[in-house]
Image (spheres, coloured by chain):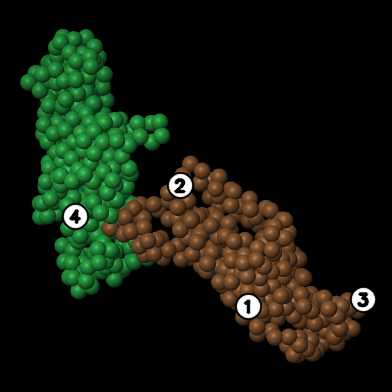
Amino acid sequence: MGHIDLKGVTKRFGEAEVIPPLNLSIGKGEFVVFVGPSGCGKSTLLRLIAGLEDTSGGVIEIDGKDATDVPPAKRGLAMVFQSYALYPHMSVRKNIAFPLKMAGMKQAEIDQKVEGAAKVLNLASYLERKPGQLSGGQRQRVAIGRAIVRSPSAFLFDEPLSNLDAALRVNMRLEISELHQTLKTTMIYVTHDQVEAMTMADKIVVLQAGRIEQVGSPMELYKTPANVFVAGFIGSPKMNLIAGAEAAKHGAATIGIRPEHLRASATEGLWQGRVGVSEHLGSDTFLHVATDHGMLNIRAGGDVGFYHGDTVWLTPDAAHLHKFGSDGLAIR
Amino acid sequence: MARAISTRTKIAYTLAAWAVGLTIFFPVLWTVLTSFKTEASAVASPPEFMGADWTLQNYADVWARSDYARFFWNSVVISVGSALLGLAIAIPAAWAMAFAPGKRTKDLLMWMLSTKMMPAVGVLIPMYLLFQYIGLFDTRTGLILALMLMNLPIIVWMLYTYFKEIPGEILEAARMDGASLRNEIIYVLTPMAIPGIASTMLLNIILAWNEAFWTLTLTTIDAAPLSAFIASFSAPQGLFYAKLSAASTMAIAPILILGWFCQKQLVRGLTFGAVK
């Protein structure tokens, strides 16, 4: 259970085509992350899968069956929303029990399932509280609890962590990943945060303007980006992209080099530059260096002694140089 | 940042508010005072206040002369009935307009409201004949229908504004949780909109209670509510101001008391969504 296929799925709002015909296959038990800048259509795509939006064309298959016109309630999917979307007038217990009640389950069985989910999510002592009396992280857990009790064939997450503070986000990220390990259910996760995508996904789908730019494992995308967009989007700090004469020397329209693949030296190197900001994080130092090829980011060791105004020489690691043609596609 | 308001300005505003409030309340006060005067004292010119003959006789006369309980019961059935029926129709309608709007939803809302701009007397004859023809004349059912239709645009508009305040994601969550449309409305939307629904209902009970045009023209005896009870004291024997005032006071007292107890709810309901 949990195999989802999109075949030529399109979505138009009036005249505007937000999702041109798109094909995607999501395997059973996979953790798939849709990532892209805001407005790229990732949430719309998720809502199409959920059935909350109607498709303008194409077929959505869930477990081999055509679900294109099946209402959301009947698709067997569970969704966690950005705003948590808890029922404010119901207690945590009733919130989690709601999908089971809608499924017509017996009260004794509902109680058992709710207690079980509450235990897994550390909510046991909050069951009688209303959502308004919970913290953001607890609310998010209730939303997840509501999703897991009904044992859906897939979970859909719509930017579930973006309302949480940074520390909590890291915790919840781990909790969701652990949940996936435990449940082994298909999960589709939408985010604009490429760190979330890299850390959680089995498979990342990079979207731009409704089109899939690349599909692959986090490391595939990191090591072999299919085009300039993916190269610039995946990875933090961003890949340095250089166009013009320097790129032409390598027979490309644009070359890309990741910050960790640029060696900084005080005495010798290929490109000369001046340190703008140096961010010392302890484990790493991020140098922002102004060069003839624009501002370049360098990830150096924690004890690198470059400071604002220093002259620095940079040398790219030739083995990790990415080349892109004038069409933006990678040259392999 | 909030602007500090000087004490003098505060006093001026308070006085102005009291002046407006008293002006609005004055006719009611006059009616209540007159109801406790003798007929002679009631028509005295200049009006008597301190030296008036105060009496409870008007109430005794009014009570003895007509069946107040029957009029009162009719008013209760008609106003509560029309408000409930209106809600039953308006909740799904407002749901559709708020959460599944079409291209013409705004036009539809405006059109509904525009029916309130039509003078009621314009459809008096057809309504009268229609009610006669289908046997709804002088029935409580007929009046419930008529008043419900009259207030329906207001009910839909009010509910529409409340529903717009409810995040659509919560209803979508209910859909994802397997709720049918009916369950979505019963278990999620309605409980969340209870404050709005309550104040809508309250306002519509008040509107229906005070309605006089249709209640007077579409009833004679059986279904006549308190508006007809008041009117019965003005026509046949000429004008007896004191008795008329007593009847009026008896007619407005129940709704005034209801409104007094629910004023917090009413004000919250009417200003809902105005301040976030």
Marks 3/4 same chain: no
What residue type is disc 4 on? Pro
Q: Distance between the residues labelled 1 and 3?
A: 37 Å
Check residue A284 in the rendering and tell me which mark sits there, or answer none: none
Q: What element carries label 3?
A: loop
Q: In this view, does B273 lie above or below A221?
A: below
**Do badges 3 and 2 share one subunit?**
yes
The colour of chain B is brown
- Asked whether the viewer can see residue B229, the reply is yes
| Chain A: drawing colour | green
Q: Point out the frontmost of discs 1 and 2.
A: 1
Extreme residue toward the left, this view: A319
Q: Residue B45 carries which label?
A: 3
- Residue at (12, 36) in percent of width and height: A217
Three-letter code for the amino acid on which mark 3 is drawn:
Ser
Q: What element carries label 4?
A: loop
Which residue, given by chain and number where applicable, does mark 4 sit on? Answer: A152
Residue A306 versus residue A135 in the image, above or below: above
> Given contact means CB atoms under 8 Å apart, are the residues at marks 4 and 2 in contact?
no
Give the mark toward the camera: 1 or 3: 1
Residue at the farthest front position: B133
Category of crowding for the residue at label 3, using alpha-carbon neighbours closer than 10 angstroms: few (below 14), some (14–19), many (at least 20): few
Residue sitting nearer the eye, B273 or A292: B273
For mark 1, name the chain: B
Disc 2: which residue: B101
Residue that label 1 marks:
B74
User: What percent of the width, then of the height, locates residue B44?
Assistant: 91, 79
Residue at mark 3: chain: B
Q: Is mark 1 on a helix, strand or loop?
A: helix
Q: How far apart are marks 3 and 2 (CA)?
A: 60 Å
Would residue A184 be found to the left or right of residue B91 on screen? left
